[in-house]
Amino acid sequence: MSSPRLWLRNPLAIFTANDQDARGGIVVQDGRIVELVAAGQQPSAPVQQTFDASQHVLTPGLINTHHHFYQTLTRAWAPVVNQPLFPWLKTLYPVWARLTPEQLGVATKVALAELLLSGCTTAADHHYLFPDGLEQAIDVQAGVVQELGMRAMLTRGSMSLGEADGGLPPQQTVQSAEAILDDSQRLIREYHQRGEGAQVQIALAPCSPFSVTPEIMRASAELAEREDVRLHTHLAETLDEEDFCLQRFGQRTVDYLDSVGWLGPRTWLAHGIHFNDEEIRRLGEAGTGVCHCPSSNMRLASGICPTVALEAAGAPVGIGVDGSASNDASNMILEARQALYIQRLRYGAEQITPERALGWATRGSAKLIGRSDIGELAVGKQADLALFKLDELRFSGSHDPLSALLLCGADKADRIMIGGTWRVIDGEVEGLDLKRLIADHTQAARKLLGTL
């Protein structure tokens, strides 16, 4: 039996991510968008329920394509506040190696709740830490995703190149190739959902060139091809990484990517800052996507992603908040604002509009993770929606509601719908005791850092 037809009527402003006219709102039924209503029009068929959206800016649910949920436990930690990437990592690795399943669970819930409240409906996480006792890390994350009713691309990360062999991570954080591939296979078979409306999906994600061997990169690419899942890794984030690849492999990062079978449309990369013109051309021809992480790139002084050049070459571009120890937040609408501003520094105000930044956070991000059913407002797409009010002091005097969303710094959604179900109402996550979560998370963070 079909659910009632719900008309979200006459929004204050609407961003469809595809230039269709839906100024009269959208109609939702059975978890999907079934009609776009043009300005001044009524739905073409009777509706059973109506939601007055006249005070809301309506967008597709935002999609975060790179994160490290566990890092919410090490935000703003004094020893790494002023460090660039490599020393930042080497200082934090021993702390993260002590992570327990319980701590990961609460860290994941905090990251997802924060994302949800910021307008995010789908999140990709890159988890690559599996020390003794944390072998079931992805299982823990999948449980939290299902509890909160979000969608997620959980990427099974890995580190196999420890300090003893010339890599960056300490030995207690690396795994054997056999353990990595066996668990990757298990997770795909147990959790990976296919087709429209999928809630949990799995991708394979060796951490980075400086923490895995070429053999695990090749084996992961072969497994992803056989199982038809996506590939993800960090690449070209810093000049230190470029130097590491040249010294260890005798290749720049894109040459290395190609040599291990990763240069193709199945792959999306986190950061993608230090590419030359020829490498950008090759990425575009291959259809390899790049996730822009502006706040993290600014925090660690890594550089600015060449988004416009990548898009012009044919490479999809999306947005990610990156880990909460280098951002140090999990807020997607603020990340879109940060992308708008940092990209204007590189390409100018005329090219980088609020609509373009929101497009990266929605339709662009959906393309990165291989989803055609989310990321835009169109008939047949999943009813994943974010609704923002502009009734706070920061918005007073603003004139264009869609521009105000980013320019005036919206940081919290009023309502969130995922698959036709309200998950956030009046700025609160349905069924979540936020005060209890904060208390549990604070205790876990102090315990992890030995300050409890």
Image (spheres, helix red, strand yellow):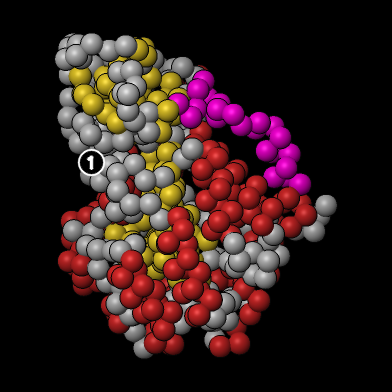
Q: Nearer the viewer, residue 250 or 288?
A: 288
Q: Give the farthest residue toward the right.
A: 452
Q: Is residue 425 magenta?
A: yes
Tell me the amino acid under the disc marked 1: Glu
Q: Where is residue 115 drawn, in percent x and y?
A: 50, 40
- 322 lies above or below 161: above
Q: Nearer the viewer, residue 260 or 308?
A: 260
Q: Is residue 294 visible?
A: no
Q: Determine whether 409 is above or below 190 in the image.
A: above
Q: Residue at x 45, y 26 (%)?
A: 422
Q: Which residue is mark 1?
A: 350
Q: Is residue 400 left or right of residue 75?
A: left
Q: Residue at x 63, y 50 (%)?
A: 105
Please tell me whether residue 238 belongs to the stretch shown in magenta.
Answer: no
Q: Which image quadrant is residue 46 in?
A: top left
The quarter holding residue 334 reads top left
| Circle 1: element type | loop
Picture residue at 20% right of the left edge, 36% below the top: 18
Name the image quarter holding the N terminus.
Answer: top left
- Relative image position of residue 407 (x, y in whole percent): 39, 32
Span highlighted in magenta in the image? 422-443
Residue extending furthest toward the front? 1
